[in-house]
Image: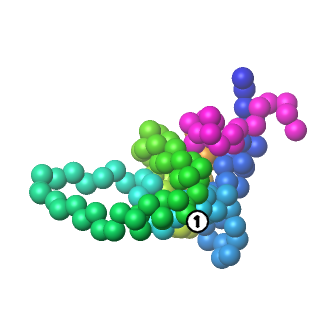
Amino acid sequence: MGYDRERTIKNVSDFFGNPLAVNKPSEFKDLMDLAQVSNADSLYHSPVINDMPMSHDDGNRVDKAVVELIGNQSAKETIRLIRVTLNNMDDRYARVIYLRHFKCLPMIDIAETIGYSPSNVEKLLETAYYRFALWSESFLKLTCPVGIE
């Protein structure tokens, strides 16, 4: 099945929302709130692995259980799937989405960070959006089939 590239890109852009807009909701921001994820960095960076021993403080298990019940499990699962999607994408695409929507950088700052011109960053971000839609099709349904209005 073919997808309408421009409409699919717009759907993903709308899903993430404008990162520079103050108090403007988006599905992604709402999911983060429902899933009780306060650190968007955790969705993209891989964990640091070292051989140093660690202690694991279990704290109050009842409190943790209550917090788990309060959180929206469906939103948590969607956020987990978004994390998997970003980690499976080519790094340059995942990174530009991360810089734009998780670090809330304007295009000019992204261009300086990755060494591209602002117009090339825009093209890269559009391709990243399209690939994100394809990778996340099974759970986000952001693609638009050709010929469907």
Taking the view exactly as shown, the residue that stands out farthest to the top is: 1
- Residue 137 drawn in magenta: yes
**One can see residue 3 in this view:** yes
Left of 102 or right of it: where is 54? left
Q: In the image, what residue occupies the spot 59% across and 62% down?
A: 34
Taking the view exactly as shown, the residue that stands out farthest to the front is: 62
**Magenta span:** 132-149
Secondary structure beneath disc 1?
A: helix
**Residue wearing tag 1:** 33
- Residue 136 drawn in magenta: yes
Q: Position of residue 29 (x, y in %)?
A: 61, 63
Q: Residues within 10 Å of mark 1 (few under 14, many from 20)?
A: some
Left of 113 or right of it: where is 136? right
Q: Position of residue 23 (x, y in %)?
A: 68, 75
Q: In the image, what residue occupies the spot 76% across and 43% down?
A: 7
Q: In the image, what residue occupies the spot 11% across and 57% down?
A: 52
